[in-house]
Image (cartoon, rainbow, N blue to C red):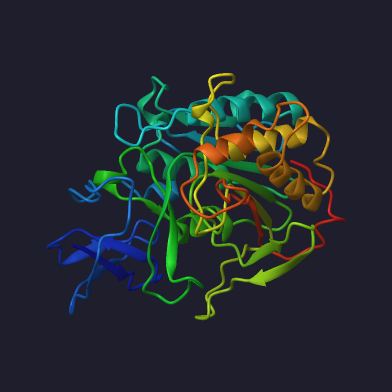
Amino acid sequence: MLMLVNCSSCHTPLQLPPGAKSIRCVLCQAVTFIADPRYAPSPSAPSSHYYQQPPPQLQGPSPYNHAPSGPPPQAHGSKRAVICGVSYKNTGYELKGCINDANCMKYLLVNRFSFPESSIVTLTEEETDPHKRPTKHNIRMALYWLVQGCQPGDSLVFHYSGHGSQQRNYTGDEVDGYDETLCPTDFESQGMIIDDEINATIVRPLPHGVKLHAIIDACHSGTVLDLPFLCRMDRHGKYVWEDHRPRSGMWKGTSGGEVISFSGCDDNQTSADTSALSRIASTGAMTYSFIQTIERGHATTYGNMLNAMRSTIHNTDEHEGGFISSLLTMLSTGGSLGGGLRQEPQLTASEAFDVYKKPFSL
């Protein structure tokens, strides 16, 4: 059984190992002692062995107070990115397209948007450097590096391709009652990375003049950055901004910066992988649609971007013969849209804006 408690200082949800009487918060380092424990069921995960052992105690200062282990890349100009592709190799929930997603996204950022290669941290299981494998600790460290020392005018990108999941929220700050999560390679032993922590690490500290884009290709990823506003758009392109600010009043926005996130699907949906098709390299459907929208010149405004991504996924495309649409029919795991999977890319933001007037830029 897994116990979920709030940090006694900053109130961040913490996952307490069975039998433990106290836990140290990774964000503020405060120690919370457990008096009257309330146990909760283990959250859902791609495997039944979700939490086998407590996380190791980190030596030295908090990872949120220094740069990633090893020589971090130097940020040149005003652009830097963290790219994670998690394939879960040699497990029962292996994904075929995530490393391709990471490689394609890096190529896009370098060649289309002039991100210096030395300002991009790439985490995949193919990396020989142990600090650049997508473990929970390494992803945490990379996210901290992403926003560390950022200045007005900086453009930051976080791309993640891998498994996503959900777990029950007991603090009352989620509209649907669930926290969204990302699954690092070692999530079975170290746990998932929950949206509260992602928000606290790369959203809330963002200062005025800094822009962050997140591209999250994972299941249940609609609000995985816990941003205050979600753009609810229908098939005709009409939209309203839903207010997802917690009823508790806790601020989930930035410190003046701007965050915009594209995610593969709504919180209650799953994202597809194109490994069912041999005619192309395996990729995540959402990452593919994101890159194709840019390559075909449809990324003019954020509204046009979102519509084009959804069109690429659901409709027959003149260049690819509707492979995504056919794929989603074959991979259907829930919902219905012409017999296929109902996967709707989502747009969330730290502030609401006119999606058809705001130009898209990285």
Foreground residue among 43 and 160: 43
**Residue at 39% across / 71% down in the picture?**
11
Quarter occupied by the N terminus: bottom left
Q: Is residue 73 visible?
A: no
Q: Which quadrant holds residue 15? A: bottom left
Measured from the top left, where is residue 191 in percent x and y? 30, 50
Q: Is residue 166 above or below residue 186?
A: below
> 229 or 68: which is nearer to us?
229
Left/right placement of residue 344 relative to residue 331 reads right
On the picture, is 251 further left or further right than 54?
Answer: right
- Image quarter of residue 241: bottom right
Relative image position of residue 69 (x, y in whole percent): 40, 34
Q: Quadrant of the C terminus?
A: top right
- Residue found at x 15% / y 62%: 20
- Return the residue found at the far right: 357
Q: Nearer the viewer, residue 218 or 197?
A: 218
